């Protein structure tokens, strides 16, 4: 298989009448999906799409995304999923950075950002949530899917995923077809996913973990159930009706199910078909794992770990989840995990160091960011003297390995904050804080939180000392930042605490945030 | 408090929505007051849904049970008022 367009074509050929997508209780067969993809692909072609173009996709999690992804792929274009939680300024940056020539989305969402796109020559294609063409005329005609086979090879760009770095605006990670194809093949291998599986998808496709679910489904001819999660009872009803067999989520999602105000303690057991759950994107404590295995006793609980830059790295199989609490497991097939100390040497058992990923899944790095690429994608001599060096990904995560080789996550090496599975740049939060009049210094940092993994805290100084402006400042942050980046706690200082060298005194700020001084 | 007329209740619920979902615009609130579905406007996610339930319980002095907690019961102002009135009876 050369690319995800071919993957799609081979799947519709093999599974024509089978259900591909379920959304709002409606079933879409592979054949129907192919028709929608063909219509959009043909229309995009008529509108001048070229090999190597980037197509932005904007809207809530719905079949529209599936249609847009494969329509782009069939035209040898790359797709870029824009998260609806991003603010218009963030979307504008992502579109400018990727150079997207097309933007596909629901009218409701497109209207929200149209103003920010005025100065760009982006062709807008409105689709409904089912992937049907709206104002953009459908070229229904005789064009058949596959009449023009996609040419891309595995090394060509399939997707760009935007993720916050440790500084400034979101960075685009360029994902080749090879990564998506390997992800589908390897993950469906160790999760034993077959065409009989019905996988519940609540994670957006702008998240590599969520996107991997779609690719495994298409590769196996399985069914994906798309759902916008709000209330646990609704998810349980949807999963029960669709006979869901697999579910993936992040740690912050699960406590919704253990809240007796929101759902019945035995409600999880009613999804009798559920055979596995995967969970990734944050710490998994004993309390959470015990609650999860109790709430879904019929399902195997598997912990996964990955980075956008290298997709999937480790997993902990179900039989070890309660025996190796706190572990993210061992490397997935075709990957090796290295743990290097500050001297660049492999750590001994128990010694903490940075996780490095080598082998399958490695992406093309960050778009428009050679400096960060040099920092995060390092070269190692692994094939012997004089040979070309292998590219290895630095995670920035602090981990250790026990004597049996199981890996444990201890936190971030850099200052990046991970909250509710989102990576948050402290600089981005600080820049918004500093844009409020009277604020001279701002320092954002993460504090541990059992639910979110980390919560954003913000320290600011010279806030004019006027209490009445405190509410205005909070309002400013809430308006200018995505929900997940809004500081949970704000500390005000007349003068920002600094160390003797004049640097911001983060230990002091963290102790203050923790109520220790 | 629950004996207030629907218009007052609507205004109070809008205030709560604004509180739990700060990115709601005045335009959104107007649409909600005109009967637009909160879910169609995509302004409630799982995090602020829990906050919405807590605020409704606190402000109106009602107790919501797990059986009530489906987005279908909170889609529109009319439905929220309906469930609040049912809870108080």
Image (cartoon, coloured by chain):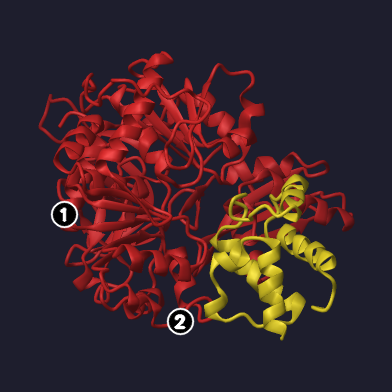
Chain colours: A red, B yellow
Cα–Cα gap, marks 2 and 1:
31 Å
Residue A262 position in % (x across, y down): 52, 76
Residue A158 seen in this snapshot:
no
User: How crowded is the residue under tag 1: few (<14 C-alpha within 10 Å), some, or many (20+)?
Assistant: some
Of the pair B66 and A503, the residue shown nearer to us: B66
Direction from residue A498 to residue A410 in the image, left or right: left
Earlier in the chain: of badge 2 and badge 1, it is: 1
Residue pictured at 54% horizontal, 39% vertical: A167
Direction from residue B77 to residue A184 in the image, left or right: left
Vertical arrangement, residue A88 with respect to residue A202, above or below: above
Asked if badges 2 and 1 are on one and the same chain, I answer yes
The label shown at residue A264 is 2
Outermost residue to the left: A384
Residue pictured at 27% horizontal, 24% vertical: A156
Of the pair B34 and A8, the residue shown nearer to us: B34
Vertical arrangement, residue A31 with respect to residue B66, above or below: above
Vertical arrangement, residue A157 with respect to residue A273, above or below: above
Task: Check whether the beta carbons of the residues at disc 2 and disc 1 lie within 8 A of each other.
Answer: no
Residue A235 seen in this snapshot:
yes
Q: Secondary structure at mark 1?
A: loop
Residue under label 1, please give it: A194
Q: Secondary structure at mark 2?
A: loop
The label shown at residue A515 is none
Direction from residue A434 to residue A169 in the image, left or right: left
Of the pair A173 and A464, the residue shown nearer to us: A173
Residue pictured at 66% horizontal, 67% vertical: B79
Residue A501 position in % (x across, y down): 63, 46
**Dividing the image into 4 quarters, which one contains the C terminus of chain A?**
bottom right
Q: How many marks?
A: 2
Quadrant in the rendering for residue A143: top left
Residue A363 position in % (x across, y down): 30, 34
Instruction: Report in which chain the residue with disc 2 lies.
Output: A
């Amino acid at each position: 298989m050369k690319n995800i367009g071919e993957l799609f074509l081979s799947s519709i050929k093999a599974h024509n009448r089978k259900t591909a997508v379920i959304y709002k209780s409606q079933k879409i067969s592979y054949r129907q999906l192919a028709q929608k993809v063909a219509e959009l692909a043909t229309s995009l072609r008529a509108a001048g799409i070229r090999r190597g173009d980037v197509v932005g996709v904007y809207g809530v999690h719905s079949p529209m995304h599936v249609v847009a992804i494969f329509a782009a792929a069939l035209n040898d274009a790359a797709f870029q999923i824009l998260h609806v939680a991003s603010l218009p300024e963030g979307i504008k940056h992502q579109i400018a950075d990727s150079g997207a020539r097309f933007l596909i989305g629901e009218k409701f969402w497109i209207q929200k950002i149209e103003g920010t796109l005025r100065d760009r020559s982006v062709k807008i294609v409105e689709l409904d949530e089912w992937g049907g063409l709206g104002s953009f005329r459908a070229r229904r005609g005789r064009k058949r899917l596959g009449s023009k086979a996609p040419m891309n090879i595995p090394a060509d760009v399939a997707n760009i995923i935007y993720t916050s770095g440790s500084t400034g605006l979101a960075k685009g990670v360029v994902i080749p077809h090879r990564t998506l194809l390997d992800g589908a093949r390897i993950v469906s291998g160790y999760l034993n996913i077959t065409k009989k599986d019905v996988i519940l998808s609540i994670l957006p496709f702008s998240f590599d973990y969520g996107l991997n679910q779609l690719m495994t489904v298409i590769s196996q001819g399985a069914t994906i159930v798309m759902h916008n999660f709000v209330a646990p009872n609704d998810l349980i009803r949807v999963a029960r009706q669709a006979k869901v067999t697999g579910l993936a989520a992040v740690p912050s999602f699960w406590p919704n199910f253990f809240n007796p105000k929101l759902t019945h303690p035995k409600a999880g057991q009613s999804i009798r078909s559920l055979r596995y759950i995967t969970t990734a994107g944050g710490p998994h404590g004993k309390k959470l794992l015990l609650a999860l295995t109790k709430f879904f006793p019929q399902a195997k609980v598997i912990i996964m770990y990955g980075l956008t830059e290298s997709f999937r790295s480790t997993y902990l199989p179900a039989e070890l989840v309660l025996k190796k609490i706190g572990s993210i497991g061992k490397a997935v097939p075709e990957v090796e995990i290295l743990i290097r100390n500050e001297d660049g040497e492999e750590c001994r058992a128990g010694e903490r160091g940075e996780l490095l990923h080598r082998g399958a899944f490695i992406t093309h790095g960050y778009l428009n960011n050679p400096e960060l690429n040099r920092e995060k994608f390092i070269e190692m001599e692994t094939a012997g003297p004089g040979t070309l060096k292998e590219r290895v990904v630095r995670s920035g995560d602090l981990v250790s390995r026990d004597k049996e080789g199981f890996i444990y996550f201890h936190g971030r090496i850099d200052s990046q904050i991970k909250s509710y599975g989102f990576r948050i740049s402290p600089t981005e939060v600080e820049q918004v804080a500093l844009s409020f009049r009277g604020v001279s210094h701002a320092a954002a940092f993460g504090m541990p939180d059992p639910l979110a993994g980390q919560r954003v805290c913000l320290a600011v100084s010279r806030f004019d000392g006027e209490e009445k402006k405190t509410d205005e400042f909070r309002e400013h942050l809430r308006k200018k930042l995505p929900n997940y980046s809004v500081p949970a706690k704000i500390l005000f200082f007349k003068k920002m605490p600094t160390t003797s060298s004049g640097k911001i005194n983060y230990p002091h700020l963290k102790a203050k945030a923790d109520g220790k001084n | 408090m629950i004996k207030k007329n629907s218009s007052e209740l609507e205004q109070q619920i809008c205030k709560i929505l604004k509180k739990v979902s700060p990115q709601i615009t005045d335009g959104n609130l107007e649409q909600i007051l005109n009967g637009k579905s909160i879910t169609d406007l995509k302004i409630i996610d799982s995090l602020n849904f829990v906050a919405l339930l807590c605020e409704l319980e606190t402000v109106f002095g009602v107790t919501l049970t797990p059986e009530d907690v489906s987005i279908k019961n909170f889609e529109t102002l009319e439905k929220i008022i309906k469930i609040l009135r049912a809870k108080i009876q």
